[in-house]
Image (cartoon, grey):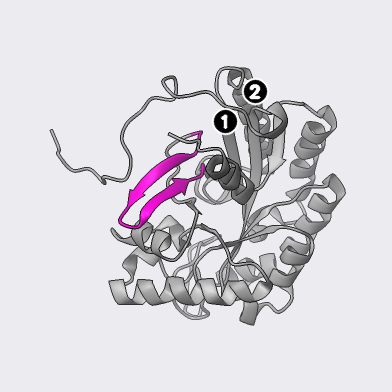
């Protein structure tokens, strides 16, 4: 049997934990983590709509860039119509490469969370000094939007062995990289506790649509079914559903209607058990009340 273990959290089944409520007695916290990302032209990492044939890869680069130029603004319209705040997961390079986009997230009241500098590089590939400098630089740059970020999602959900320690050292309250639970849990670090807030790798448009070749109607059904199942469990335990979106995927014109239909249905139902929130507000509630396993 392998003795390898990360040492960040211990096993504790979800059926054997303290019960508590979200604000106003609600039981299911739902938030949207919207990924605003930039990539390198002619190199670096990047999702592919189809295999690249030449370099520079104009087709895939331009497809990804569509999200920042068009798709993001289409999603803003949808969220405005439904009265929903989101957690804006921002590459810091968005500030320079897409002037006004990060500011639009801030101005509509979205939570500003850090998503590294660029998605052209996986965070876990950085040497310790480079990762340390990157986290400090990203934090300082995003703080120019008016609020220092307290949440982090690593580019490519990639970490080094030291990432949680470095995040805690830089004052981060929570991380989204560990999709291991339906409740906030505490990660041990060398600089105190760090909350892991659930972030879905299943109800996430990138693996669902690009990797599994599903489409928007199926993705919308995943949201509907996920909410239905979690609502059937939430009388026994508080739960979190993070829905991950990328504007270059779900911001495409043919995909927004399916997303709009399911979110309109859920909002119209006005279920008193649902707390429509942000990842940061979930973390703040947990910290203020001494919660989380």
Q: Residues within 10 Å of mark 2 (few under 14, many from 20)?
A: some
Q: Which secondary structure, mark 1?
A: strand
The label number, if any, that marks residue 269 in the structure image: none
Q: Give the range drawn in magenta.
A: 182-198
Q: Is mark 2 on a helix, strand or loop?
A: helix
Q: Quadrant of the C terminus?
A: top left
Q: Nearer the viewer, residue 172 or 13?
A: 172
Vertical comparison of 214 with 107: above or below: above
Query: Which residue does the numbered mark 2 point to in the structure image?
Result: 231
Q: Which of marks 2 and 1 is in front?
A: 1
Residue at left 37%, top 56%? Answer: 164
- x then y, percent, for residue 18: 48, 24
Name the residue at 47% across, 36% down.
292
Left or right: residue 261 compared with residue 240: right
The foreground one among 291 and 97 is: 291
- Which residue is tagged 1? 239
Whether residues under marks 2 and 1 lie with C-beta atoms below 8 angstroms apart, the answer is no
Q: Quadrant of the N terminus?
A: top left
Image coords of residue 22 (percent x, y): 64, 33
Residue 73 can be seen, yes or no: yes
Q: Locate residue 51 relative to residue 270 in the image: left or right.
A: left
Q: How far apart are marks 2 and 1 (CA)?
A: 9 Å
Question: At which x and y percent is residue 274?
Answer: 71, 31
Residue 127 seen in the current view: no
Return the x and y of residue 175 as percentages of the image width and height: 47, 53
């Amino acid at each position: 049997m392998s003795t390898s273990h990360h040492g960040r959290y211990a096993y504790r089944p979800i059926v054997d934990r303290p019960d508590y409520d979200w604000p106003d007695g609600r039981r299911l916290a739902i938030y949207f983590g919207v990924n605003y990302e930039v990539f390198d032209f002619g190199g670096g990492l990047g999702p592919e709509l189809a295999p690249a044939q030449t370099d520079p890869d104009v087709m895939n680069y331009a497809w990804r860039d569509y999200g920042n130029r068009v798709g993001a603004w289409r999603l803003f319209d949808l969220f405005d119509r439904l009265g929903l705040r989101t957690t804006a997961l921002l590459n810091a390079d968005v500030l320079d490469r897409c002037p006004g986009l990060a500011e639009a997230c801030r101005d509509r009241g979205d939570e500003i969370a850090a998503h590294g500098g660029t998605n052209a590089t996986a965070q876990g590939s950085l040497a310790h000094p480079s990762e340390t400098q990157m986290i400090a630089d990203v934090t300082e740059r995003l703080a120019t939007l008016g609020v220092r970020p307290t949440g982090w999602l690593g580019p490519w959900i990639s970490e080094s062995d030291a990432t949680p320690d470095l995040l805690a050292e830089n004052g981060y309250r929570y991380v989204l990289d560990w999709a291991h639970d339906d409740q906030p849990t505490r990660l041990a670090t060398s600089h105190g506790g760090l909350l892991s807030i659930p972030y879905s790798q299943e109800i996430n448009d990138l693996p669902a649509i690009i990797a599994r070749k599903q489409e928007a109607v199926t993705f919308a059904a995943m949201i509907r079914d996920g909410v239905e199942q979690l609502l059937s469990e939430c009388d026994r335990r508080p739960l979190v559903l993070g829905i991950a979106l990328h504007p270059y995927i779900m911001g495409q014109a043919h995909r927004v209607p399916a997303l709009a239909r399911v979110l309109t249905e859920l909002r119209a139902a006005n279920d008193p058990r649902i707390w429509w929130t942000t990842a940061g507000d979930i973390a703040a509630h947990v910290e203020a009340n001494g919660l989380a396993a």
